[in-house]
């Protein structure tokens, strides 16, 4: 796999949220606003990239790897938990409003299956540079997925999209034009499950169409 | 002989692993202690800023002598606003937490003037997890004199939040007479 | 007493761990149609939740707070949970190899179950006393089992129904979860 393929696979082909369906818990909760989605994305990015890098560095050293192997899962967990705690403290100090919005989901990054999953499946058996690229790609893919869903939910549910802090895009005029109110249920638990279900179904349908097209082309080519 | 050797090797492995985890734990603990010392001050400032913002909504702090009493008992702390001329208490800002039946822990700032009227209040923080959305209301809850809570009007549809607010008002009403009457003068 | 009953009700339905708080989604979506597996999984989670919440609560109140190292909360909590799950695994393997085999990969995955760590942290952030912590955790766990059970029954029916191709599997499961979520959220107004 080339370095470029390694980086880009997390965007679409192996998108952790849409394809592997990992990291659902925080996703349902933080996609109520774009700001929250971006904030969670930043946190996950920091933890995933550094954890992949650190774990790859540890496991690349034969002596260390041999020491760590029998207890590698606890070791990964401690490393990840440390990184998550740093994110917690930094957000608490410098991004206070985001910290309050994301609440319990910041410490819960430590049990986000994506991070432990990549550590075990990729970082532990690849070189540090590759592990870092993998982390970057997966984190950006995850954030992208969160952004898409939060734009969908926030627009339909609140009529505006909060980009960051006081910067927000008020699209209420679209609703006024259509003569309806924003559909509040989209920013509630119901809407979370509904949005995810609809978006995943849409993506599956698109994926299926592509497979059919490819199969059709294959048949044509073979005459 | 064989078995004993095997057991010894296993123990050594277990010991090795334990040691690895211990060393790792110490490294991580130290790292976090360092980060903590860097961020702790800013964290405290953030928490206090929310409280002072609530106070400053209703009073110009510069017009008074402000002191903060840490209580950490029925109320969390009391912001005492004394007159600059005769040091008597003009108003008290109560930082108080309550959750009623609903398990939504609210921290409020309730401002009481020396004639026991409720100057104002605001919710400083709450413990609801993301996804709920606490409706923090621009509502006066029907309480104008803190010692008379009979008019407390909880708003339909947000009963769970109202319960926490009601408990906060109740706690304050229990101690307000004593505080203005001299309990705080020492 | 009223307080405790309201707390139990809230934990079970109004603030249901899966349908309101979005914790424990992974096992929820992965639950098999075999109801016995859903129940076995549920009770394993309840057990780990309860013991870990008790241990973490005590550790937080009497060690972390006393030493002013509250920031170590996440690390300490997850280590407690991981160790507990490891011990439960060893125990079940010895006592009931059949159950161990049936639970398979889902047993070690309890460590990464957001609900377990989530409840431990929520007990602290909601400033529960010991009794409130026990009641809250127990009913959160029971709520988890309840929803998992209902869902495994529904999934059985769904798997036999003519679902559009794009919706099969997770998407339709999420739509059904949405309907369950509305039903559960209506109960919030009762308190």
Image (cartoon, rainbow, N blue to C red):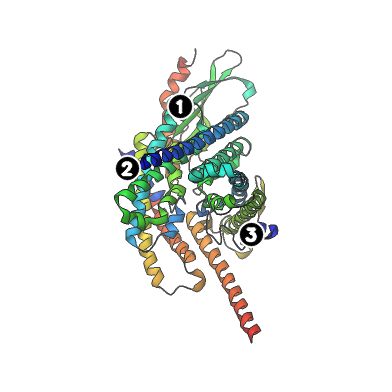
Residue C5's mark?
Answer: 2
Label 3 vs label 2: CA separation? 47 Å
Residue at 41% in and 35% down: C57
Q: Which residue is mark 3?
A: A11
Q: For the residue carrying disc 2, how many other residues have a C-alpha within 10 Å: few (<14), some (14-19), or many (20+)?
A: few
Q: Nearer the viewer, residue A14 or B144?
A: A14
Judge whether B34 appears above or below B64 on screen: below
Viewer-nearest of discs 2 and 1: 2
Viewer-nearest of discs 3 and 2: 3
Residue at 51% in and 40% down: B139
Residue A191 horizontal/vertical position (percent): 51, 58
Residue C162 horizontal/vertical position (percent): 43, 75
Q: Nearer the viewer, residue C158 or A121?
A: A121
Judge whether C130 appears above or below A27 on screen: above
Look at the numbered disc 2 and give the secondary structure of its residue.
helix
Using the image, name the chain to which the residue with label 3 belongs: A
Q: In the rendered image, is residue C191 in sight?
A: no
* Image quadrant where residue B38 sits: top right
Residue B74 horizontal/vertical position (percent): 42, 26
Q: Nearer the viewer, residue C174 or C91?
A: C91
Label 2 vs label 1: CA separation? 25 Å
Residue A170 horizontal/vertical position (percent): 65, 54
Q: Which residue is mark 1?
A: B75
Judge whether B112 appears above or below C167 on screen: above
């Amino acid at each position: 796999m080339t370095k470029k393929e390694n980086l880009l696979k997390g965007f679409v082909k192996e998108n952790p949220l849409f394809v592997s369906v990992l990291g659902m818990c925080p996703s349902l909760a933080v996609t109520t606003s774009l700001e929250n989605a971006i904030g969670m994305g930043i946190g996950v990015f920091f933890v995933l990239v550094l954890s992949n890098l650190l774990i790859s560095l540890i496991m690349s050293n034969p002596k260390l790897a041999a020491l760590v192997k029998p207890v590698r899962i606890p070791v990964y967990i401690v490393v990840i938990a440390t990184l998550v705690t740093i994110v917690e403290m930094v957000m608490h100090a410098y991004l206070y409003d985001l910290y309050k919005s994301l609440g319990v989901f910041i410490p819960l990054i430590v049990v986000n299956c994506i991070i432990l999953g990549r550590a075990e499946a990729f970082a532990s058996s690849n070189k540090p540079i590759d592990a870092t690229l993998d982390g970057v790609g997966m984190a950006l893919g995850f954030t992208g997925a969160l952004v898409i869903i939060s734009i969908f939910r926030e627009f339909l549910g609140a009529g505006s999209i909060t980009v960051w802090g006081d910067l927000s895009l008020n699209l209420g005029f679209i609703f006024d034009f259509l003569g309806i109110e924003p559909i509040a249920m989209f920013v509630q638990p119901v809407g979370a499950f509904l949005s995810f279900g609809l978006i995943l179904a849409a993506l599956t349908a698109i994926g299926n169409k592509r497979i059919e097209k490819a199969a059709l082309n294959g048949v044509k080519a073979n005459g | 002989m064989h078995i004993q050797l095997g057991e010894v090797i296993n123990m050594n492995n277990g010991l090795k692993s334990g040691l690895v985890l211990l060393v790792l734990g110490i490294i991580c603990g130290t790292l976090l202690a360092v980060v903590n010392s860097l961020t702790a001050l800013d964290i405290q400032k953030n928490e206090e800023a929310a409280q002072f913002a609530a106070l400053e909504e209703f009073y110009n702090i510069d017009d008074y002598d402000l002191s903060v009493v840490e209580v950490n008992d029925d109320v969390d702390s009391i912001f005492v606003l004394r007159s600059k001329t005769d040091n008597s208490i003009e108003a008290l800002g109560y930082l108080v937490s309550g959750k009623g039946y609903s398990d939504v822990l609210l921290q409020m700032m309730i401002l009481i003037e020396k004639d026991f009227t409720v100057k104002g209040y605001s919710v400083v923080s709450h413990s609801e997890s993301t996804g709920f959305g606490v409706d923090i209301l621009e509502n006066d809850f029907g309480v104008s004199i803190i010692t008379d809570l009979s008019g407390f009007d909880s708003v339909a549809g947000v009963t769970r939040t109202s319960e926490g607010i009601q408990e906060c008002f109740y706690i304050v009403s229990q101690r307000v007479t004593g505080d203005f009457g001299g309990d705080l003068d020492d | 007493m009223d307080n405790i009953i309201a707390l139990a009700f809230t934990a079970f339905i109004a603030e249901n761990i899966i349908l309101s708080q979005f914790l424990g989604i992974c096992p929820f979506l992965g639950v098999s149609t075999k109801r016995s597996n859903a129940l076995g999984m549920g009770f394993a989670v309840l057990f780990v939740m309860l013991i870990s919440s008790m241990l973490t609560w005590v550790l937080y109140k009497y060690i972390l707070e006393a030493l002013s190292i509250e920031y170590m909360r996440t690390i300490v909590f997850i280590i407690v949970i991981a160790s507990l799950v490891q011990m439960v695994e060893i125990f079940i393997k010895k006592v009931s190899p059949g159950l161990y085999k049936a639970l398979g990969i889902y047993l070690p995955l309890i460590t990464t179950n957001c609900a377990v760590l989530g409840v431990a942290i929520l007990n602290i952030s909601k400033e529960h006393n010991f009794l409130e912590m026990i009641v809250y955790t127990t009913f959160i766990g029971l709520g988890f089992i309840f929803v998992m059970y209902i869902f495994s029954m529904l999934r059985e029916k769904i798997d036999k129904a003519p679902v559009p191709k794009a919706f099969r599997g997770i998407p339709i499961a999420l739509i059904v979860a949405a309907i369950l979520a509305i039903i559960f959220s209506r109960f919030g107004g009762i308190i």
